[in-house]
Amino acid sequence: MRFIELGEYRSATIDIDSDLCDRLIDVAGPRLDVRVARHGRVEIRANSNVGVISVDDLVIRVRPKVPLANLFHMLGVDTSTWTWGKDASAFGAGSDDLAAATVALFARSVETLCAWGLQHGYVAQEERLSGIRGRVDMTASMRRSWERSPIPCRFDEFVPDIFENQALFAGIAAARKVPGIPGRLGAHLRLLEDQFAAVRRRSITQAQIMSWKPNRSTRRYRTAMTLVGILLGQRDLIDRDRDVTAASFTLDMNVLFERYIITGLARRSPEPLLVGYQHGMHLDRGRRVAVAADLVVTPRSGGPPVLVGDTKYKLNDGVGKASDHYQLLAYATILGLDHGVLIYCDGGADSGSGSSAGDPVTTIDVVGNKQRHHVYRFDLSGSRTELESRLDALGEYLWKLVPVPAAPPLLHQVAGSTA
């Protein structure tokens, strides 16, 4: 196996034949920039997608600049029982290996559920029995009225073959296909699979996991089910002509950062305001050029937007990129707003972003109109508690930019009333 390690937006030049290069382009798609360089060599450049892509004997790992503990926190995965570094190395994985860490965390979650005992539930069964159990299936009995035994019965069986366990079973199968996981971790998954002997193997989709709602008895499945959704969201490609497997496990940090910021702000928005996601609008009066802003704040009672913003998972020098300001200028102009916000990812003092520990905000006044753009650097380093505190601070800053609604007129005293 040949391993290539890259950081986000980093590149490497390697020697591979043209056939493997074509297959890598097909498998990676937009998740890697692959182009032929000089003298037949191939340049591979990472973008915002992190994880692992495997084609034949070539394995490319892209490490996130965000600490894995914070990355899982952004995904909504509870890692309070997970010791970073120690637990990952127990399975032979590095502490910055996203794919292996995800699988290891999932295996730990499933192992804990199995130790406490898999959740059971009542499942409807139909079976012909020598004696009556539950209710006699009269419809089935009338179809074969000449048969007196066995008796068709309908009854509820208290078994572990419920949706949650079927999803975990499917998650284990998906985890075993993740490329580059250590042998110890693969063996652990095979042992866990034996715990699901009484559970049917069925096809589970990511959409089913996303719509799943825990109840009082299945709350302990929350972490494992979140990880199942991540695992089922990956794609697995098989070249059947040559019997060679190409697989990948990646996360788009652009999407993850955007959702984390906007859902975090939505939870923190004051009662009169509503935080919207991917607000669609049109640049022209003919409604032929469609655009969408990441973040739009509107009054909960209705009315036009009062604030617009965009999230950018990339480092900046404090002022922001010109192309990003062009986007924000268009959004604010369409909505008739004087303020717009660009929220940039910041990896902390060691990320090379040039940020300081001081004010994370830079403002610029746009020439030719009254617009003011606010560039906010959101630091993704530190602990989960610090991340949540920074979301609090971001929300407080944004709500101050929103125009205060006019107070309702005071009611006049009824004539003749006493003070």
Image (cartoon, rainbow, N blue to C red):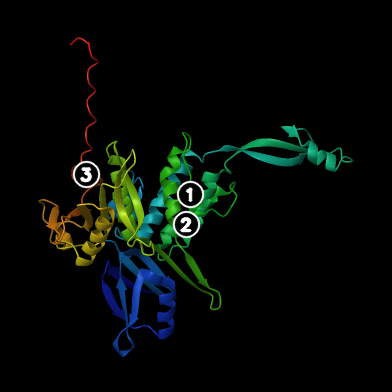
Using the image as rendered, state which of residue 46 and residue 261 is in the foreground.
261
Residue 47, how many percent across, how many down? Answer: 30, 68
- Disc 1, SS: helix
- Residue plotted at (33% across, 55% down): 256
The reply to whether the C-beta atoms of the residues labelled 2 and 1 are less than 8 Å apart is: yes
Crowding at dot 2, Cα within 10 Å, few <14 / some 14-19 / many 20+, comes out as: many
Gap in angstroms between the C-alphas marked 2 and 1: 9 Å
Is residue 306 shown left or right of residue 131? left
Which numbered disc, 3 or 2, marks the residue closer to the eye?
3
Q: What residue type is labelled 1?
A: Ile
Instruction: Between residue 369 and residue 25, name the one nearer to us.
Output: 369
How many badges with numbers are in the image?
3
**Label 1: few (<14), some or many (≥20) within 10 Å?**
some
Q: Residue 232 carries which label?
A: 2
Residue assigned mark 1? 209
Disc 3 target residue? 402
> As displayed, is residue 54 above or below residue 197?
below
